[in-house]
Image (cartoon, rainbow, N blue to C red):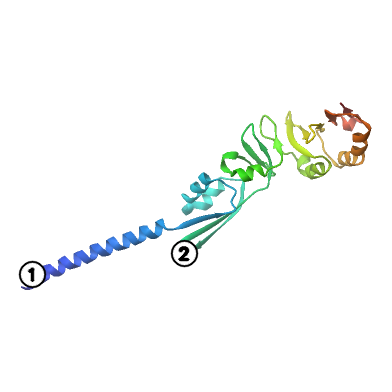
């Protein structure tokens, strides 16, 4: 009788351990699968969000590879993970190379981003290779954009820029952009517009040789 009781006890204990193991396994899987991951105002597309989700355990090293992300914040709340991504400031979009150019010269494929983000980029880079923002342009672009309604920009021969305006006129900039050039444009652009019939381009390439051309 004692032997049978012992066998029954061992059998019941085995059943309990098996059921407990099954319960905790299912509980773990259920909780794991029920974790909700929310991206807040990320501007990246769903495929890239999934890539990040699959690399949460190593998110620091993973995101270091994507230089267009300025910073991120990850918060955990029970079964929810909230991810805030802040992107760098975009400068232009190049539809030939399918790239976004950021103000610090970081370049990223357009495929990483949502359409709303891409549509919000007002400046189009029409260079054959994505534009490089040199120190002159970096310093004086805001001043230029306040003087001209710039729609497109093109990097020419790796040394200077053409600006295409909303009225399709082209402004050919010299290699060097400085306060002297900005001052001249600011004080003369209204006069040039009113007193000339140029419709194609304003050529400032030889500005420092005191020569400008209009057509």
Q: Secondary structure at mark 1?
A: helix
**Residue corresponding to mark 2:** 78
Residue on which the image places disc 1: 4
* Residue 200 position by quadrant: top right
Between 181 and 91, the residue placed more toward the observer is 91
- In the displayed structure image, the side of residue 21 where residue 12 appears, left or right: left
Residue 47 lies, in percent from the top left, at 51, 44
In-front residue for pair 211/32? 32
Quarter of the figure that contains the C terminus: top right
Q: Position of residue 64 (x, y in %)?
A: 56, 48
- Left or right: where 193 falls relative to 95: right
Q: Based on the displayed image, in which of its 4 quarters is residue 211 positioned? A: top right
Q: Is residue 207 left or right of residue 41?
A: right
Residue at horizontal 62%, vertical 33%? 97
User: What separation in Å lies between label 1 and label 2 (alpha carbons)?
Assistant: 47 Å
Label 2, secondary structure: give it.
loop
Relative height, residue 163 to residue 62 (above, below): above
Most extreme residue toward the bottom, as rendered? 2
Residue 111: x, y in percent? 57, 39
């Amino acid at each position: 009788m004692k032997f049978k009781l012992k066998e029954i006890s061992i059998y019941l204990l085995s059943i309990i351990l098996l059921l407990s193991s099954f319960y905790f396994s299912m509980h773990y899987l259920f909780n794991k699968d029920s974790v909700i991951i929310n991206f807040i105002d990320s501007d990246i597309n769903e495929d890239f969000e999934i890539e990040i989700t699959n690399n949460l355990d190593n998110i620091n090293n993973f995101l270091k590879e994507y230089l267009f992300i300025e910073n991120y914040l990850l918060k955990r709340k029970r079964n929810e993970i909230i991810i805030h991504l802040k992107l760098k400031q975009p400068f232009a979009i190049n539809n030939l190379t399918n790239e976004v150019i950021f103000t610090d010269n970081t370049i990223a494929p357009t495929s990483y981003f949502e359409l709303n983000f891409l549509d919000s980029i007002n400046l189009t880079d029409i260079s054959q290779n994505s534009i490089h923002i040199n120190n002159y342009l970096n310093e004086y672009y805001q001043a230029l954009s306040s003087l001209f309604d710039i729609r497109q920009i093109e990097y020419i021969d790796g040394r200077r820029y053409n600006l295409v305006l909303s009225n399709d006129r082209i402004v050919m900039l010299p290699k060097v952009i400085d306060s002297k050039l900005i001052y001249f444009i600011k004080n003369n652009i209204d006069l040039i517009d009113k007193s000339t019939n140029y419709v194609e381009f304003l050529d400032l390439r030889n500005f420092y040789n005191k020569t400008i051309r209009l057509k």
